[in-house]
Amino acid sequence: MMRAGWTAIGKEHFGAAAIPATDLEAWVFKHESRIFGLFQFPPTVTTGESIAAVVVTGPVASSAPEQLSQTPVRYFILERASGTSTTVLEYSAAGFTAVRSGPMLGSGPSAFSDVVMEIVFGKKRPTAQEAARRLVILENLSLYAEATPLLRQLHDRGGLPPEAKADMHKIAGGLFSDALQKRQLWEYVSPAEREFLECPVGKLTEQQVLNVLWRREAARVLAWALGILSELTPYDKALPRENKKLVPGDDAMNFIASARLREEKEIDSARDLAELWHWRSRTRQLMEEGHPFQPSEAMKKAGLNTMQDIIRASAQLAVQRGDLPMCIADDYPVRGKAYRDLDADEWSEVRSVTVERHFTLNWLCGYAPLNGWDDTPTDT
């Protein structure tokens, strides 16, 4: 039915030139009360060409053909725009109309379907219980990551038979996986987190371990949002290196059941501040990579001729709004100096704090498609 409907839309607009839906790659899946049909078109070449399409049927109580034929259907297209950008269009009586920007050109089909699902279902914030579960999971991951250097040393010792190495991973990673399963949390562990827990200790890379260790900053944000921490430290101060248990008590299930989040406006305000700091990080990255700044005529008239002019104006506005305590040399204040004067190591640490906070607060505010932790965007 979906193929026939899509073919009819194509013939209406393109006549005999339309490619039959039967010749396209297609996937069908169901989410909640709706059925999604995803069609992948041939590779695009120029701006304005369609990349993929999604047909959404529902809500439906069953997938019986007689009921589906009476069910509302929505049609979406992903169209190539300028550069690496794309546009999502929806069909109506007036034809296809742009509804929002799409994923970056070259993203997989699932990225487009995620955008459509957000349009259909709306942006949904995670509940307090979902945030509490995520905090418990991150605490377990952090403990495992902290133990991996010692486990790797034992793994690499000479004379250790292969069966002992296999047992070591089963005992190490399996210990944390079993703990999450016993707490009925394993289904909430993200795909990337499962990959980390299931990877043999000897094959874990330093970057994998480091990425998980930085999730302690994400855990800190969750603990703040759940009222466990009274405040977040300034952006130039990361979570202390020593392990600090953030989940109160030993009964994780009771902690999750009784969890409460701060008011949405307080979390929204923290998210906006995190995005501001992340924007400053990206401007420094662009400048160091030598990307040219091309101001529009309106920007030139406003005296914004360089990236540094933009940074100065942004910092001054942030001070006026109370987002920054002061400016230092027309820049964001970090560790008693201007952001641009941070050395490479200082910038790396401040940037990592910023990314983790922006990531976590975006998730808390419902920016991740279907609340998928791994899929949380950090656009600025």
Image: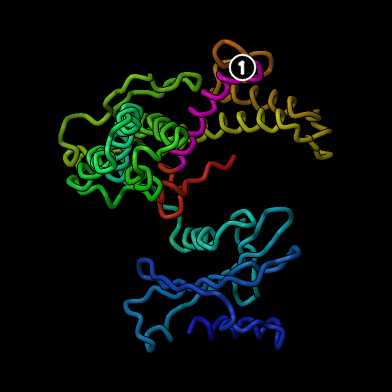
Q: Which residues are magenta?
A: 338-362
Is residue 194 placed above or below 73 in the rendered structure?
A: above
Q: Is residue 223 visible?
A: no
Provide residue 279's location: percent of width, then percent of height: 61, 33
Is 170 in the magenta? no
Q: Residue at x 34, y 42 (%)?
A: 200
Residue in front for this viewpoint, 105 or 55: 105
145 left or right of 79 in image: left
Would you place residue 59 above or below residue 88 in this image?
Answer: below
Instruction: Tell me which residue sits at (71%, 68%) in the image.
Output: 49
* Amino acid type at mark 1: Asp
Res 253 quadrant in image: top left
From this viewpoint, which residue is outermost toward the top? 336
Element type at marker 1?
Answer: loop
**Residue 223, image x and y in percent?**
32, 31
Residue hosting label 1: 343
